[in-house]
Image: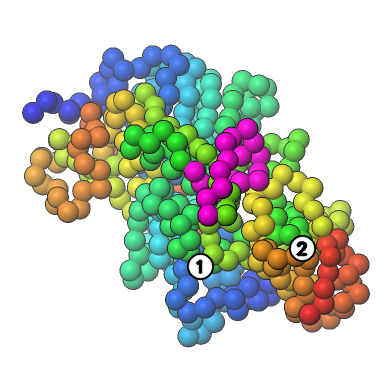
Amino acid sequence: MANKVYKDAKSALDGLLKDGLMLMCGGFGLVGIPDKLIQAVRDSGVKNLTCVSNNAGIDGAGLGLLLDTGQVKKMISSYVGENKTFAQLYLAGKLEIEFNPQGTLAERVRAGGAGIPAFYTKTGVGTQVAEGKETKVFDGEEYVMERGLFGDIALVKAWKGDKSGNLVFRKAARNFNPIMATAARVCVVEVEELVEVGQLDPDHIHTPAVYVQRIFCGAPYDKKIEQRTVRKA
Amino acid sequence: MAWTRDQMAARAAKELKDGFYVNLGIGIPTLVSNYVPENVDITLQSENGMLGVGPFPYDNEVDADIINAGKQTVTEVKGTSYFSSADSFAMIRGGHIDLSILGAMEVAENGDLANWMIPGKMVKGMGGAMDLVAGVKRVIVTMEHVSKDGASKLLDKCTLPITGKKVVDMVITEFGVFTIDKHGAPGVTLVELADGVTVDEVKAKTKAKLTIA
């Protein structure tokens, strides 16, 4: 079996990175973001990146790291509210943004990974999102056509992975990760725990190994919390 | 006395029915979960990929991997499930969620909703709002009746870029409860007045075709 296991983020990205790539990034807020891979992309210095990601991180964390260094040319996202650097870059004309409704973004990625070039959705009909796009009426209701998305490299974070690339996600850290894994030429995955092939229950695998080309263990993780909200004891 | 934010949330909670799957937006809608009537069991959906959302955790229960769509830490309940963002919006777009309660900047008498951008101001994005209003079976808006500068937010036509066309079924403001027949003739029907609010007051502060039930 071909070896998919690398020792760290830098080696896992070796030979893949160059200017102008489209990166497909898992995560929602700071949950399930490919932390170590984003740091390695920052350290590589590649520029003019297009990042497909639901959010843009926060200042100093997640994709915020690549915004701080000016490595991102364009974001395709649904919500970027938490990032001040983002606002500054955007207002200065140094960053493009394409807003997609979150479900449309998810489906564009899912479709791209599934070999579907376009689909129709009722989300956004009659809004700015539908401007300039083809529409069609099915059963008396109007739908707008959206294109599938397929990128150069998927950056994915999973909980457990085996050495063949089978993945298991943990709780709400699953989010965009399984679909991003399917929607790029090369999928690179960081996991909290890397196990031997055969140690994951086949019925519990969320992403089958076929989608994954490179994998490494990124532990230890210091998981950040954006909105720590508690109730009184 | 017009309703407080909590009274608006409590009124919205009366629309919950036993067995409903519900998605709550940020702000007043979040408060609705504090007023779920007795003998009504609902399941909360969070569009980041969680069905069966529990209350905020106690300090020693916080798990960084369990958040709601507002990125707040939450807890699981018995029967919670997790799924991908694509599955989450299949659930929403496919009409499997019974009710969405969300905030708004403007609602028009034909059911149009605006809550995602103000031209000229920094736009943060629509998140899942456009998918929710397009796909969920019933949409209730909780919002203040007038803006900070005194303008009606219940209008004949939205002035801001819309989030969805003909999507709102009910609006709850501090003045009362209003229904909209989004498939019928444009117009807002006042179906319930908050204590101490008069019909004339509502008429004066509403810029939509108003019918009194």
- How does the figure colour the protein chain or chains? rainbow
Query: Along the line of sight, which residue is nearer the eye, B2 or A35?
Result: B2
| Amino acid type of the residue that numbered disc 1 sits on in the rendered structure | Asp
Q: Quadrant of residue A17?
A: top left
Q: Specify the segment rendered in magenta.
A: A120-139
Give coordinates of residue A223: x percent, y percent.
38, 44
Q: Residue at x 64, y 51 (%)?
A: B164
Does the image show residue A90? yes
Tell which residue pokes out farthest to the bottom in this image.
Answer: B39
In the picture, the disc for residue B186 is 2
Position of residue B161 relative to residue B49, above or below, is: above
Residue that label 1 marks: B98
Query: Along the line of sight, which residue is nearer the eye, A82 or B146?
Result: B146
- SS type, badge 2: loop
Does the image show residue A222? no
Mark pair 1, 2: CA separation: 24 Å
The 10 Å Cα crowd at callout 2, few under 14, some 14 to 19, many 20 or more, is some
Indicate yes or no whether the magenta region holds residue A133: yes
Give coordinates of residue A175: x percent, y percent.
39, 47
Q: Quadrant of residue A113?
A: top left
- SS type, badge 1: loop
Query: Along the line of sight, which residue is nearer the eye, A210 or A91?
Result: A210
